[in-house]
Amino acid sequence: MVKKLFKLINKEFHGVNEAALLLGSFTFVSQLLGLYRDRVLAHVIGPGPVLDVYYAAFRVPDFLYVSIASLASITVLMPFLVDKIHNGKEGKLSAQKFINNIFSAYMMFMVLICVVIYLLMPFLAPRIAPGFNSEQLSLLVTTSRWMLLSPLFIGLSNLIGTVTQLFKNFFVFSLSPIFYNIGILCGIFFLYPIFGVYGLAFGVVIGALLHLCVQIPVVFSHGFFPSFKKVNWKEIWSVIKISLPRTLTLSCGSLAFLSLIAIASTLKSGSISLFNFAFNLQSVPVGVIGISYSVAAFPVLVRSFSSKDMDTFINHVVGSAKQIIFWSLPVISLVIVLRAQIVRVALGTNTFSWADTRLTAAAAALFVVSLVTQSLVLLFVRGYYASGNTMKPLFVNISSSVATIIFAFFLIHLFKNDSSLLYWIEGFMRVHGVPGTEMFALPIAFVLGSVLNFFLIWTMFKRDFLKDIKSGIFKTFMQSFFASVSMGAVAYMMLNIFDDIFTTHTGLGIFAQGFFSGIIGIAVGGAVLVVVKNEELVDIYRAIQKKFWHSKPVAPEQGEL
């Protein structure tokens, strides 16, 4: 059985669709475990001061990870390792020295930064969550300090993950995020009842350690486990020069998200928790669609651009963009229509009230509007990375991140001083009378920033690569849009019909109502696509005929899982 599994993993893929479908399947499983983690948090703790502290405590460690640990990312290190290990008899020794050098520099720098942040946490906490009271700030300081071990371990796991990918051990690499969530769940079930919010932090640290440990035996078996050596700073600088623009791009997004959390801390208690629940829900389709297609396309884009095969480069970008649109618009339609059923099934338990459900559902529906733009940005950014241009994505992300923060402050000010717009949004989202709707400013600001991000990078990408080329993207958009509207309308009508058939007072009844409404809506949308002879639907059918599950999964970096 084990041999068959490894044989499955190491098979080559035949195209982007096959690889993306398989990667999306793996990602979906990982995302489901993340949703279960959120459900347990909602059940055991519920939105409120404690969970707000827990989510706020993630912000500094997460920023530390994307701004420091990502300098030694798989995307950057892999070309160095491949070049060295294939360099004759001395290749393995040269690659081992390179890993040791990166490991030594990483540990020295990361430990130093963690110590500095540890000492500065009492000064950083009021900036991270200005709306917290003194007790919450005290908890935030200690919880964040414990969580500083998390980016240290996951960054190291990402480093040795380069070795597991180099030797095609994709299976063990894909296990890391699963073990990470298992550690968090252990913290919720076993440590939270004893240590409170600190127990949740201990669970995160345990998860990060498991994230690392699951890969260690494989790295040892290849003789590539890193050790401390004298640092060759010239080599380190050559890596940093390549990875710095990408790291700064990620850091801008993390800073924008940190700012949204800071604003949420000044709103009704529980706003940070609900905001994170909604964001995590919308992250599922972003991971399954956007990351899957962009990661699956990246190796082809790199090879085609380096060989100056621009026709292949453009065809894969355009083809992946069409598939992203093809999948994203129906998901947007269904999430908006079935938002209450989705949230109630995923999170509606124990302390998670109906009011919490309505707010989270509305916020998730607002977030998911940007699914197309988020996913396409991931693709076009990788297109630029494949071409060796890392500065344009950096410029775009800085602009959109700053804009997101400005939008958030402006909308919060507007909602507090002029209730007419908020009143209209409450009516549109059907949440009149539910306290805490001011938090809608945050997902709206995120969506506006995402749309700006897409507009800027699409304008530049089209000018640089797609000028005077008939891509057919608009045709795909219109076909998928028409099918999605039909799908949403039918699903909405079926909700009203099934409301009289299934009881909505139980989780099973709510699930059945949403599931059957969605299935019938999807059937109608699929029929529309068949009638208009949608090419993307044909491509998916061909990928299934080729048995995409026999393809080799293209594993993304763990931060993207």
Image (tube, grey):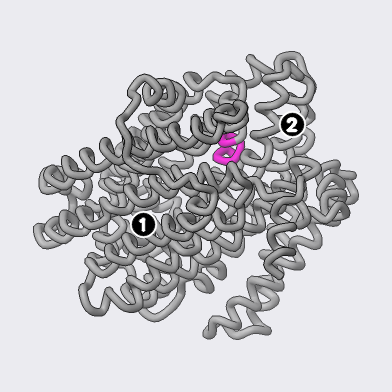
In the foreground, 545 or 555: 555
Badge 1 element: helix
Residue 271 appears anywhere in the view: no
Tell me the mark number nearer the camera, choosing from 1 and 2: 2
Main secondary structure type of the part rendered in magenta = helix
The magenta span reads: 373-378
- The disc labelled 2 sits on which kind of residue? His
Sequence-wise, the earlier of marks 1 and 2 is 2
Report which quarter residue 31 is drawn in: bottom right
Placement of 125 over or under 474, stated as above or below: below
Query: Does residue 131 sit above or below 4 in this rendering?
Result: above
What label does residue 316 carry, if any? 2
The residue tagged with tag 2: helix, strand or loop?
helix
> Residue at the location (48% across, 41% down)?
447
Residue 363: x and y in percent read 45, 55
Q: Position of residue 320 (x, y in %)?
A: 71, 37
The answer to whether residue 535 is above or below residue 461 is below
| Other residues around mark 1 within 10 Å, as few (<14) / some (14–19) / many (≥20) | many
Q: Is residue 9 left or right of residue 410?
A: right
Task: Write down the residue under mark 1.
Answer: 437
